[in-house]
């Protein structure tokens, strides 16, 4: 699903450098990215999704070389194939819950918004306990409800890859479990790949593999470890 080769990335300012000689994540795998702040977790997710571009190296997602696409190509590929879940939710506060879920279909011409898509968005909302909130503005929701909106938006296009960046960082324990239940259920049911950056080591038992990002800048990633 994900293949990273000879990757190097630096920001224009500061000393941060991310170097990954080789990293692979198999289709259907559920993997966690761990490491201290500044170790490259978010940067790696942004590189895989095509939000950021490396100085050198190759990244393939499925059969597409993301690093070989131009900006418009990366954006279109991301919208069609990658569901992204953010710690800060990234919702548009002037839109309703339903319209936030439908957002991927409103920002690109490569997806067609029709009645079937609208009904799927409603089903997703009902499935995460937001049936009574779909027409409300997202500013009226709790933190846990807002993150569930973000998860529904990420799942709307039936993506084969889910990238989650500290998706439970702002949630209480019960909502943490609920959000991860939704992500894991979707991944298992659809054979999707799930790659999650997290500081919460209490959640690691749920993953089949852990990748330690603190080893990236020193010359390569950890191979990951199977969890019992």
Image: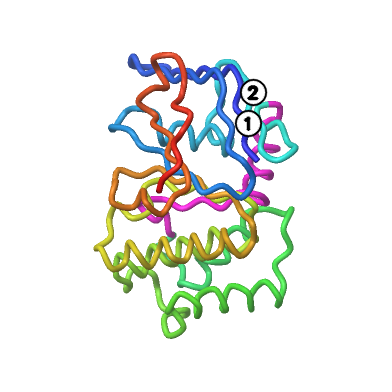
Please tell me which residue lies in front, 206 or 112. 206
Residue depth check, mark 1 versus mark 2: number of the one nearer the observer: 1
Label 1 Cα crowd, 10 Å radius (few <14 / some 14-19 / many 20+):
some
Q: Is residue 164 left or right of residue 170?
A: right
The image position of residue 57, as x and y in percent, is: 61, 18
Q: Upstream in the sequence, badge 1 or badge 2?
A: 1
Q: Is residue 44 magenta?
A: no
The answer to whether mark 1 and mark 2 are in CB contact below 8 A is yes
The image position of residue 148, as x and y in percent, is: 42, 66
The colour scheme used here is rainbow
Q: Is residue 76 magenta?
A: yes
Say which residue label 2 marks. 58
Q: Is residue 66 left or right of residue 227?
A: right
Please tell me which residue lies in front, 97 or 181. 181
Q: In the rendered view, would you say 91 is above or below 116?
A: above
Q: Residue at x 48, y 29 (%)?
A: 223
Q: Residue at x 41, y 36 (%)?
A: 42
- Give residue 107's quadrant in the image: bottom right
Q: In the rendered view, would you say 144 is above or below 39?
A: below
Q: Residue at x 42, y 85 (%)?
A: 132
Kind of element beneath mark 2: strand
Q: Residue furthest front?
A: 228
Q: Which residues are magenta?
A: 68-91
Mark count: 2
Q: Residue at x 54, y 58 (%)?
A: 154
Q: In the rendered view, would you say 128 is above or below 14?
A: below
- Give residue 12's quadrant in the image: top left
Q: Is residue 199 left or right of residue 131?
A: left
- The image's mark for residue 3 is 1
Label 2 Cα crowd, 10 Å radius (few <14 / some 14-19 / many 20+):
many
Gap between marks 1 and 2 measured at Cα: 8 Å
């Amino acid at each position: 699903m994900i293949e990273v080769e000879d990757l190097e990335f630096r920001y224009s300012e500061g000393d941060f450098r991310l170097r990954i000689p080789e990293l692979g994540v198999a289709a259907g795998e559920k993997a966690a990215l761990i490491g201290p702040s500044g170790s490259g977790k978010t940067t790696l997710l942004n590189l895989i999704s095509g939000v950021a571009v490396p100085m050198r190296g190759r990244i393939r997602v499925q059969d597409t070389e993301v690093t070989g696409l131009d900006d418009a190509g990366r954006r279109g590929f991301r919208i069609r194939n990658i569901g992204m879940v953010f710690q800060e939710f990234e919702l548009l506060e002037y839109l309703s819950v339903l319209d936030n879920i439908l957002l991927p279909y409103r920002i690109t011409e490569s997806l067609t918004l029709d009645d079937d898509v609208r009904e799927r968005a409603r089903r997703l909302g009902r499935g995460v306990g937001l049936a009574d909130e779909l027409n409300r503005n997202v500013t009226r929701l709790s933190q846990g409800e807002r993150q569930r909106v973000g998860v529904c938006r990420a799942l709307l296009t039936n993506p084969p890859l889910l990238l989650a960046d500290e998706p439970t960082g702002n949630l209480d324990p019960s909502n943490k479990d609920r959000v991860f239940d939704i992500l894991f259920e979707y991944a298992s049911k659809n054979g999707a790949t799930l790659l999650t950056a997290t500081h919460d080591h209490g959640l690691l038992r749920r993953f089949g593999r852990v990748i330690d990002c603190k080893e990236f800048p020193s010359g390569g990633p950890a191979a990951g470890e199977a969890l019992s």
